[in-house]
Each structure stands twice: as structure tokens, then as C-alpha cells.
Image (cartoon, coloured by chain):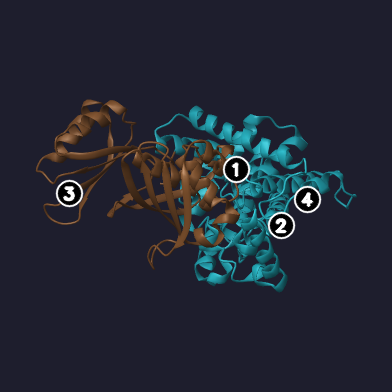
């Protein structure tokens, strides 16, 4: 797979192809599989993503510890805010839904990880529903998202323990922003800017889950990560460019992760996990799990 | 090499790719070492597995793997109850495997029929795993291939005989590694293959006079 997004963008531009097409061709060569076979695997992932969204919207899910659950349903049935009736609110709901399913030990697609699994399905299926796009377009978008994630894995990290939440929900937001921009007919260059715009908004984000559990704030970080992705998509499609090239933004995310204090890398030693209430809740809930 | 399908995947039961999906894969590899669902399993958790394992369902996922469930099988949630019905007696303990061991590490001591095996393995993140020790022999097994492990007397030409059997069955070898505790001691051989070896292949390897035992481990990850 490509090790630089800018190289993939140059290839797509010179061959007059989409990034999805160059990513699928590259994967086919790497793995010795056909493009159709890879698309079929991505289509299966899409089925699981959709079913997680559906399952999470019912609202009767509770995590192991009881710390999270039931909030996706509030965006469906709760009072209106300024964004009621827009794809924005629908996408926030989808992101919470998938992450609530994950916290309740339901079946999800790690994309790129389980902790950041809500952003990509929320943004892609939410925008596709709003625009009436078919599954073919969504499978293409998943290929572009996979390309962006592979470049991040290569140049930086996709692990909260290594790079903080910027490497999980931050990476997911960048993948969602870039792939949705292409789905909405953005050029390869606009995909690069959307990816960079999303990632600059999550640089430095710490991984600080209560009790070390993939619950709080992870569920909400997937919703706010989706909001950052939507901002980046809107700006990139309007023709806004980001002056720092996308690969340099990815590199600096990796550097920030490597130098981030260990308290902020999934150890529950700092951030929200170490607040007085964070510590108290974690202690109570972990005790609860042991008793059950 | 990073694959698109590593990034958009795996399909898994939540909540954590390292503490749940990875733990399940380690259980599947352990199951292979005793050739099926163990009668007894003693599972010692190290580091983050010990500290946050219960909240992440690491215990359920390890037992699920031992029962033969894959990371996307929603029976993981109820694996501890299912184990009872399947006759798998499990115990958990917390331990320090080694000071420099990976934070997500488990040591399994498994028994099935007359066979007993110990395995140390770690979950590296994003569902990837590595087995680092089997019966005290240092190994490196990713689970991304169909793996054959065997213990043999240290006899010249032994590897050639085993690889001949594999090539006769049209099985392509990806990696092969031999370790032994001392010169002339038993050789522990790990062969990672692109293709799945059937029971007939395993039995042919077992039929070699100097092979003490040979087992097949499932492919649990990779594209």
C-alpha cells in the first residue's frame, strides 16, 4: 500500500482515476487478489457497519460497567437543537450508536480500531442516506478510507496506547473526512486537504478512558470526531486548502504521540480518567463488574 | 505490509481490538496446541490484561477462543457460561510474566486428554497477536498463517523430511524457524504456511520416528 498520501494523489491525478481506484489496484497487487474480491470484503464490512448503526439506535444497550449507553436514542427522540432534522444530527446519532454497540460487546468493524469504530460508518452511511448514494459508492469510500488509514499506520500510529486518541478517533475522523469528500465528488487533491483539515483539529488529543475501558469518553469522542470530519469535508469541498501538506500533518501526529506522556496513552493515569469523579466512577463500576 | 482490510477490519465483538479480538485470537491459538477444546485451562493475565481485562471481556474472549469461537462470534459475550456446558474448566489468575513482557500478555496452561501445553502470547493492538513461548521454547508466531508446530529429536536432515511432506501436499511455506534449548536437545520447529495443512499432513509428520508431537494452529488473522 502507499506510504504517502501525496504519492497516491499524484497517481490518481496523472491516471485520471479516483483514490479509491488507485487504492484498490495497489491492494490487489500487494495481496495477489482481484479488485472484485477486495470490494466483496469491503461490502461485507459495510453490512456489519450498517447493522451496528441500526442496533445502536434502539437505545436499550448498556456497557459492561453501565457507564455508557442509551444516548444515541436521545438524539433520535430527544428535544430539538439548532441542527435538528439535518444530516449533522443524524451522523452524531449514528456515531454514538456504533460506539454504544461496541461498549456493549456487540459486533462492529474496527475502523481503524474498535475505540474509533463509530466515526467512519456514521459519516459515510449518514451522508449516503442524505444524498441517496448506493452501496457501490460506499464501498469505494471504504477503499479510500483504508488507503488513508494505511498511510497513517505507516507514518504515525493507529493505537491509543502508542499515540493517544488522536491516533484512534483522530485517525478515524481523517479517514472519514477524506473518503466522504471523494464520495461527494471532491478531487483527489481536495481529499488530501480534507484529511489534513480533519487531522489538524485532533492533534494532541489524549487517550484518557475511565478505568482504561473503551467507554467514557470514547463514545462521545466518536461523535465529536464525526463533527470535526464534517467540518473538514465542508471546507475542502468549498475549495479551502490547508497549507501544510497532508503527509507532514500525519508525521507530526506521530511525533506528538511518541512524545506524549504515558499518562495520556490509554493507561487511565491522566486526563478525564484521573479527575476526582473519573477515579470514583471507575472504582465503583469496576467493583460492580467483579461482583456480577 | 499494511492491507486495506487490516484498516477496515476486523469485524469483531467489542469493545477493544487489543483486549477482546486479540485475546480471542490467542485463545484460538492455544486451542490448536492441544488439538481442540481443553478440559482444563489455567489463564494467568499480565499487565493491562490483568488490570482492565474484566471490563473489556478479556476473560470471556480468551475462553471463547479456547472454545473455537472467532473474534466476530457474538457467543463471546456468554462464553463463560457456554464453557461449563462444553466441559471446559477454567481458572484465572493475575501474574507478572516478565518485567519486560508486553502489557497485554497471557500465559495459558492447557490440558486435553493426556496432552498438556503451556503458551505465552501477547495482544499487540488492532487485533494483532504474537505467541512468544510454547512449553518453554521461545517462538514467534503471528497467527497470520496456517501454522504447524512440532517437537523433534535433533537429527540431521529432519527439516528436509518435513518440508518434503509439505511440498508433496502442495503446501507453500512462508516462514520456518527452529529453536532448541541446547545442542543435541529437542528441536522446536515452527512452520508458517500459506495453505492449510489437513489432518493427513499432520499425521504424516507425526509418523516420522523422531517427531515427538506435531500440532496445527489455525490462521487467526491477516488478510
Q: Chain of mark 4?
A: A
- Mark 1 / mark 3, whichever is N-terminal: 1
Q: Write down the colour of chain A.
A: cyan
**Tally of numbered discs:** 4
Q: Which residue is mark 3?
A: B186
Q: Both on one chain, marks 4 and 3?
A: no
**Marking on residue A71:** 4
**Residue at image point 19% right, 31% down:** B207
Q: Both on one chain, marks 4 and 1?
A: no
Within 10 Å of disc 4 (Cα), the crowding (few <14, some 14-19, many 20+) is many
Q: Chain of mark 2?
A: A
Q: Chain of mark 3?
A: B
Q: Both on one chain, marks 2 and 4?
A: yes
Q: Secondary structure at mark 2?
A: loop
Which quadrant, please, contains the N terminus of chain A? top left
Q: CA distance from mark 1 to mark 2?
A: 18 Å
Within 10 Å of disc 3 (Cα), the crowding (few <14, some 14-19, many 20+) is some
Would residue A188 be found to the left or right of residue B111 on screen? Answer: right
Q: CA distance from mark 2 to mark 4?
A: 11 Å
In this view, the mark in front (4 or 1): 1
Q: Chain of mark 1?
A: B
**Residue at image point 39% right, 68% down:** B99
Q: Which residue is mark 2?
A: A67
Q: Which residue is mark 1?
A: B77
| Whether label 1 touches label 3, CB < 8 Å | no
Amino acid at each position: 500500500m502507499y506510504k504517502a498520501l501525496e504519492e497516491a494523489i499524484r497517481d490518481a491525478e496523472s491516471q485520471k482515476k479516483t483514490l479509491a481506484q488507485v487504492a484498490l489496484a495497489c491492494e490487489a497487487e500487494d495481496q495477489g487478489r482481484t479488485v472484485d474480491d477486495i470490494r466483496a470484503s469491503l461490502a461485507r464490512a459495510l453490512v456489519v457497519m450498517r447493522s451496528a448503526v441500526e442496533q445502536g439506535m434502539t437505545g436499550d444497550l448498556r456497557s459492561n460497567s453501565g457507564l455508557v449507553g442509551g444516548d444515541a436514542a436521545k438524539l433520535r427522540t430527544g428535544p430539538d437543537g439548532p441542527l435538528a432534522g439535518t444530516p449533522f444530527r443524524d451522523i452524531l446519532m449514528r456515531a454514538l450508536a456504533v460506539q454504544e454497540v461496541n461498549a456493549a460487546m456487540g459486533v462492529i468493524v474496527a475502523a481503524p480500531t474498535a475505540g474509533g469504530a463509530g466515526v467512519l460508518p456514521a459519516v459515510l452511511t449518514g451522508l449516503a442516506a442524505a444524498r441517496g448514494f448506493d452501496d457501490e459508492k460506499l464501498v469505494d469510500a471504504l477503499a479510500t478510507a483504508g488507503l488513508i488509514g494505511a498511510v497513517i499506520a505507516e507514518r504515525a500510529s493507529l493505537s491509543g496506547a502508542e499515540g493517544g486518541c488522536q491516533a484512534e478517533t483522530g485517525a478515524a475522523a481523517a479517514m472519514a473526512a477524506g473518503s466522504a469528500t471523494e464520495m461527494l465528488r471532491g478531487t483527489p487533491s481536495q481529499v488530501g486537504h480534507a484529511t489534513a483539515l480533519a487531522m489538524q483539529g485532533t492533534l494532541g488529543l489524549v487517550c484518557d478512558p475511565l478505568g482504561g475501558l473503551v467507554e467514557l469518553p470514547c463514545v462521545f469522542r466518536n461523535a465529536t470526531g464525526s463533527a470535526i470530519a464534517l467540518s473538514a469535508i465542508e471546507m475542502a469541498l468549498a475549495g479551502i486548502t490547508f497549507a501544510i501538506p497532508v503527509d507532514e500533518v500525519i508525521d507530526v501526529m506521530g511525533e506528538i504521540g511518541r512524545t506524549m506522556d504515558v499518562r495520556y496513552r490509554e493507561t487511565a493515569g491522566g486526563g478525564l480518567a484521573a479527575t476526582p469523579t473519573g477515579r470514583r466512577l471507575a472504582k465503583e463500576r469496576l467493583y460492580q463488574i467483579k461482583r456480577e | 505490509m499494511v492491507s486495506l482490510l487490516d484498516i477496515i477490519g476486523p469485524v469483531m465483538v467489542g469493545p477493544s481490538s487489543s483486549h477482546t479480538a486479540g485475546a480471542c485470537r490467542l485463545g484460538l491459538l492455544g486451542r490448536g496446541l492441544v488439538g481442540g477444546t481443553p478440559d482444563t485451562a489455567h489463564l494467568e493475565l499480565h499487565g493491562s490484561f490483568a488490570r482492565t481485562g474484566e471490563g473489556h471481556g478479556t476473560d470471556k474472549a480468551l475462553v471463547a477462543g479456547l472454545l473455537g469461537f472467532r473474534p466476530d462470534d457474538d457467543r463471546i459475550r456468554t462464553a463463560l457460561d457456554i464453557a461449563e456446558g462444553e466441559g471446559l474448566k477454567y481458572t484465572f489468575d493475575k501474574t507478572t510474566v516478565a518485567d519486560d513482557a508486553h502489557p497485554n500478555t497471557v500465559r495459558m496452561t492447557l490440558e486435553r486428554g493426556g496432552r498438556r501445553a503451556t503458551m505465552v502470547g501477547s495482544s499487540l493492538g488492532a487485533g494483532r497477536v504474537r505467541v512468544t513461548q510454547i512449553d518453554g521454547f521461545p517462538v514467534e508466531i503471528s497467527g497470520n498463517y496456517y501454522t504447524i508446530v512440532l517437537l523433534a529429536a535433533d537429527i540431521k536432515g529432519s527439516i528436509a523430511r518435513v518440508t518434503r511432506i509439505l511440498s508433496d501436499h502442495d503446501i507453500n511455506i512462508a516462514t520456518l524457524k527452529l529453536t532448541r534449548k541446547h545442542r543435541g536437545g529437542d528441536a522446536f520447529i515452527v512452520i508458517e504456511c500459506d495453505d492449510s495443512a489437513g489432518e493427513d499432513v499432520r499425521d504424516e509428520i507425526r509418523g516420522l520416528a523422531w517427531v515427538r508431537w506435531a500440532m496445527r494452529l489455525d490462521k487467526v488473522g491477516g488478510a
